[in-house]
Amino acid sequence: MKSLMVLLIASVSSAYSYRFSAPALLGHGINSQNANSDDGSSTAVNANLFLDVNNGMQHLNAAQNTLSRRAVLSNLALASTAMLTSSSANAQEVTESSTMTLLEKRLLENTLSPPSYGMQATDIFYPSYFIGSWKSSSKTTNIYSPCGFELFPGGQAAYDATIQKEVIGNDILQYKARFISSNTNGDGDVVIADREYNAKEIARAAMGSFSVVDVKEATPNRFSCLLAPVEGSGGSLICVDILAIARKYESISPTKFICSEVVRQIVSPASKSNPNAPPTSPFSVKEIETISLYSASTANDAVDDNSAVKEIKCKQRTAMFLVPSQTDPVAFQKWQMSRGQPVDIRYYDVTYSRI
């Protein structure tokens, strides 16, 4: 099953290309050689939902979660050395890095610093050729763990399992996506993602037809839903809240568009007998940055004619950052050890074909 939370967040934030179950819930691999650090600062929502839920429901004690500080610091040192001696494979796709926008650099150079931008838009406003319904397919192409396995969600076992299934096994998630016209910004009609529709489609594709129990709120800055996971949850319900804390988008050319959102993802247990009750203490709280670079394909670059755009390719990167906890000493220790770097980075290739 795909990483549910990553997909959910991607769909709720940028273009809804995240994986709603295992793809977003589990995690992929470690290869810090392709991760580059910079001096920028700041974070969207990612994938390890099922894993987070399973870990929370196991009620692991502090002794079981004790981390080896020496091992983590060793991994960080090795990652830093690799970054200094190896160039980013993703960055090689661009001949002149000096001409790249901020978001392009973060995506293609696999930047490890937190995002430096804030809430720069009320929503993501897409080019007009996005409007309509699309058949979408999402494939995980790579996974990195800049801070080592000890801080990677689920550890090496989760990494190995996800790499085997999604990257090596070529596991592709297929779902429908929709972009609609809106005039809520007061500047005339604009094109936005249909957040609720897209999130539901991703969840159903990844978790099953009856996985979405309720969507309580679906706005640009908050998405809240109640899910019924089918894997490893013991039949329990989970409440997922996704809060947007940063947003930015840029038009690179008539056929290229890039956008990013940083969200705080809160996963909490919910009561079956009273699913509308306020959520209890969360299983996990994370911040995730999702950057999506879209390239439209047309016969003669006729992007003024929306119907001429039959396919859109998307290269997507999600980066998961830990947040400090005042109530969980283990979570606080992990946050300290991460030193502000993401613990889980994933790349996806997404294709949108017009229906």
Image: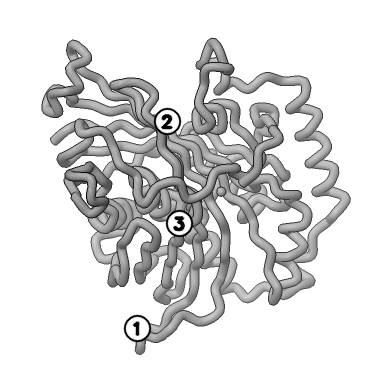
Q: According to the image, label 2 marks what residue?
A: 315
The vertical placement of 336 against 283, above or below, is above
From the top left corner, tell me how far across and down residue 205 is, in percent.
Answer: 29, 51
- Residue appearing at x 25%, y 20% in the figure: 297
- Residue appearing at x 77%, y 62% in the figure: 333
Q: According to the image, label 1 marks what residue?
A: 276
**Label 2: element kind:** strand
**Total marks placed:** 3
Q: Is residue 111 left or right of residue 329?
A: left
Disc 1, disc 2: CB below 8 Å? Answer: no
From the top left corner, tell me how far across and down residue 40 is, in percent.
Answer: 66, 38
Type of the residue with mark 1? Asn
Type of the residue with mark 3? Ala
- Residue appearing at x 57%, y 66% in the figure: 284
Disc 2, disc 3: CB below 8 Å? Answer: no
Which one is nearer the viewer's eye here, 107 or 55?
A: 107
Q: Quadrant of the C terminus?
A: top left
How far apart are the alpha carbons under marks 1 and 2? 37 Å
Q: According to the image, label 3 marks what residue?
A: 244
- Residue appearing at x 17%, y 44% in the figure: 189
The answer, for residue 350, to whether it is visible in the render is yes
The vertical placement of 162 against 233, above or below, is above
**Label 1: element kind:** loop
From the top left corner, tell me how far across and down residue 144 is, in percent.
Answer: 61, 38
How far apart are the alpha carbons under marks 1 and 3? 22 Å
Q: Is residue 211 left or right of residue 162?
A: left
Q: Is residue 36 left or right of residue 67?
A: left
